Structures are given as C-alpha cells and as structure tokens.
Image: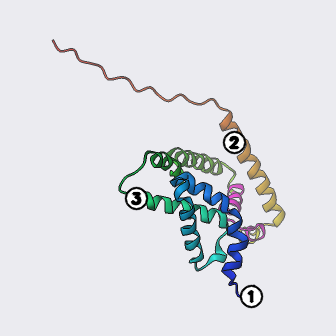
Amino acid sequence: MGWLRDIDRWFLSEVLPHAAAYRARAAYFCGRDEADDLVQEAYARVLDTQDFRAIQSPRGFVLTIVRNLALERLRRANVVRIDYLASLEALDVADPAPDAFMVSSGRSELRQLTRIMESLPPQCGRVLHMRKIQGMAPGQIAEALSISLSTVEKHLAKGLALVTRARRDDNARPEVECPRIPAPTRRVST
C-alpha cells in the first residue's frame, strides 16, 4: 500500500473507525435516507483539509462537519420538516463566555482579595503581590527588595495564611440582606 498518501493513512486509522457514530449523528439530523450522503460529503471535506495533522480530535471534527452540513441543508431547503425543527434545538451551543453572574462574582472576589491584600503588613503585601500577581520567582523578589530568600518565603507563608484566614472569616459572616425597594404608592384620584 505504498500508493497511499499520509492523509489516506490518517483517514483510515483515525476517522473511518467512527463511521457508525457519523451515520447515527447524520440520521439524527436529516433522517436515515440522507444520512449516508451527508457522511460522504463530510468525508470529502475532511480529505480536503490541508492541515489534517493539527486536528486534535478527528472524531469530534467529523461530527462537527456533519452538524454543519446538516445546518447548511436546512438553510437551503425551501420546506422545513417538523422533525428538522426538533433537531435544531439540539444544535444550540452554549456560549463559552462567562455569563453576567460569573463576571459580577469574579469582580466581587477580586475586590475582596484586593482589599485583603491591602490590609496586610506592607512588606508582606508587597512580597505576596510580586509573587502571586506579577508572577516573580522568590529569588527575583529577594533581589528586588534586597532581602534574603528565607525572608521572602516567610513573608509568602505569612501572607497566604492571613489571606486564607481573612477569606474564611468573610465567608463565615452571614450575608447581608439586600435593602428592599419600597413599592410605589398609588395615588387615588377623586
């Protein structure tokens, strides 16, 4: 089989063993009648891929192509069958970006951590900031602040212990209830 290209060998070993999964996914999206055609079209697109070696998950790559081809067919179709509409819900992909709650929560934690670090003893806070925020190595911190390496390590240990204790104390406090917004008063017209 010296006539096989590298992509052909890769296709035979990495892509083709999952053919049943591709057919099942295609049948889910467009029915059994069109599943084989959809899979063959996906294979053609995979074999046209220039940098096939960079594909981390060939199975996932082909399944994504099958899904995208099914979407293309749905968009081109003049009449959309009801079972296609049901499968469209399965295509909804969650946005990987954090939602508003996660952003707000992260900002709140950052404010809390900044407040705690500002309350540390000055040298301890400086060392902790240089190590954890700036990412400096302990040796670099010792050189920058003209202190010994063991002093840097002691400041780090003390700072981390103080931050941990302060965060634990903050989390142990009961939550403050949000102030109630008074309901608007209604005026009675006479």
Pointers 1 and 3 in contact (C-beta within 8 Å): no
For marks 2 and 3 on the same chain, the one whose residue lies earlier in the sequence: 3
Outermost left residue: 190
Please say whether residue 38 is one of the residues in the magenta stretch: no
The residues bearing labels 1 and 3 have C-alpha atoms spaced at a distance of 42 Å
Question: Label 3: which residue?
Answer: 75
Task: Please give the range of residues in magenta.
Answer: 123-141
Crowding at mark 2 (Cα within 10 Å: few <14, some 14-19, many 20+): some
Earlier sequence position, callout 1 versus callout 3: 1
Position of residue 30 measured from the top left corner of the image (x, y, whole percent)? 51, 54
Mark carried by residue 2: 1
Residue located 21% across and 14% down the image: 188
Q: Is residue 182 above or below residue 93?
A: above
Q: Nearer the viewer, mark 2 or mark 3?
A: 3
Label pair 2/3, CB-CB below 8 angstroms: no
Give the percent coordinates (x, y) of residue 187.
23, 17
Q: Tell me the quarter of the picture where residue 11 sits.
A: bottom right
Report the residue at 38% width, 23% height from top.
182
The residue at which mark 2 appears reads as 166
Residue 145 found in image quarter: bottom right
x and y percent of residue 176 in the render?
56, 30
Q: Secondary structure at mark 1?
A: loop
The answer to which of marks 1 and 2 sits earlier in the sequence is 1
Distance (Cα) linking label 1 and label 2? 68 Å
Can you give x and y, in whole percent of width and height, for residue 134 in the image? 65, 65
Residue 136 is marked as none
Q: CA distance from mark 2 to mark 3?
A: 56 Å
